[in-house]
Image: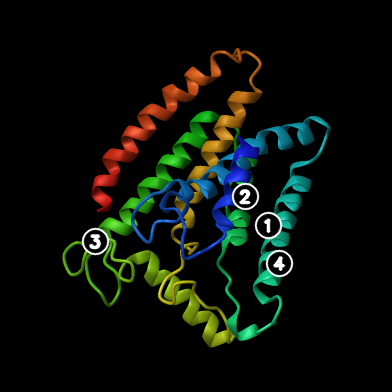
Amino acid sequence: MRGATIVFMVIVNNPGDWNRVWSPLDHAAWNGCTPADLVFPFFLFLMGCVIPFAFDRRLREGAQRSQLVGHIAWRGLALVGLKLLLSLYPFFHVTHLRFFGVLTRIALCYVAAASLYLCSRKTGFLVSVIGLILLAYWAILYALPVPGLGWPGKDFAFLDPDRNMAAWLDRQFSAWCQTWLHTGILYEKTWDPEGLLSTLPAIATTLSGVLAGQVFRRRDILPARRPMLFMAAGGPAFCWGCCGGRYFR
């Protein structure tokens, strides 16, 4: 699966001619989903799958939790640093620096998922965290007024690209950066696809990969039963997502 994800990522990011992209290989402009939009979530899911294997081995070899915390922090900072370097290269226009991005989101998701896994490896805890994250994300977007704009679905169209809590938070972060750091742009000018608030469901995706990794590690579960377990967990989750998606239109 990891190899297929990387191959598909290369195809999506290198279509040959950006003016003639086959629609399934192009990202949805806003509130939609194409096969191209599944590449990054799959990558985060697979990153989560690796966490139980790597951390359980380190703990079994005698590593202290404090050492693993340091490892998590270092890896997160290294990814953010690499992202900033790539944002500056090759012209190094500091005033056009974009803090958000794919590598920044990977770093945030890794740090959050790995830290939660260190806190507790119990399945119930991880499932509860995923549920709370998704409910909080839904509540913030659906049930909270956007400062200066009003209530979603009443004062403006629900999930308008520019008028929602996620976009507002991105603009506030960008304004703070512009004021104090004199840099910090957004990919879409008024919002960012890898912004602050939308990182919450990405963390939930990574944690779902952690749960899958735990299933792969369990020797009491026969390999032939694992697909059935994934279907039993993924089926209701898919239905819940489809039903919940009706409130995101």
Which residue does the numbered mark 3 point to in the structure image?
158
Give the answer, above or below, for where 243 lies relative to 188.
Answer: above
Depicted 209 relative to depicted 166: above or below: above
CA distance separating discs 3 and 1: 34 Å
Q: Amino acid at mark 1?
A: Gly
| Distance Cα–Cα, label 4 vs label 2 | 15 Å
Q: Nearer the viewer, residue 180 or 170?
A: 170
Residue underneath mark 1: 76
In the rendered image, the quadrant that contains the N terminus is: top right
On the image, numbered disc 2 is attached to which residue?
110
Give the crowd class for mark 1: few <14, some 14-19, many >=20 residues within 10 Å. many
Q: Three-letter amino acid code at disc 3?
A: Phe
Whole-number angstrom distance, CA of label 4 to CA of label 1: 9 Å
Q: Residue furthest left?
A: 154
* Structural distance between the alpha carbons of marks 4 and 3: 35 Å
How many numbered circles does the render carry? 4
State which tag comes first along the sequence, 3 or 2. 2
Q: Are marks 1 and 2 in contact (CB under 8 Å)?
A: yes
Q: Position of residue 72 (x, y in %)?
A: 71, 51
Q: Amino acid at mark 4?
A: Gly
Q: Nearer the viewer, mark 4 or mark 1?
A: 4
Check contact, mark 3 vs mark 1: CB within 8 A: no
Residue placed under numbered mark 4 in the picture: 81
Between disc 3 and disc 1, the foreground one is 3
Q: Are marks 4 and 2 in contact (CB under 8 Å)?
A: no
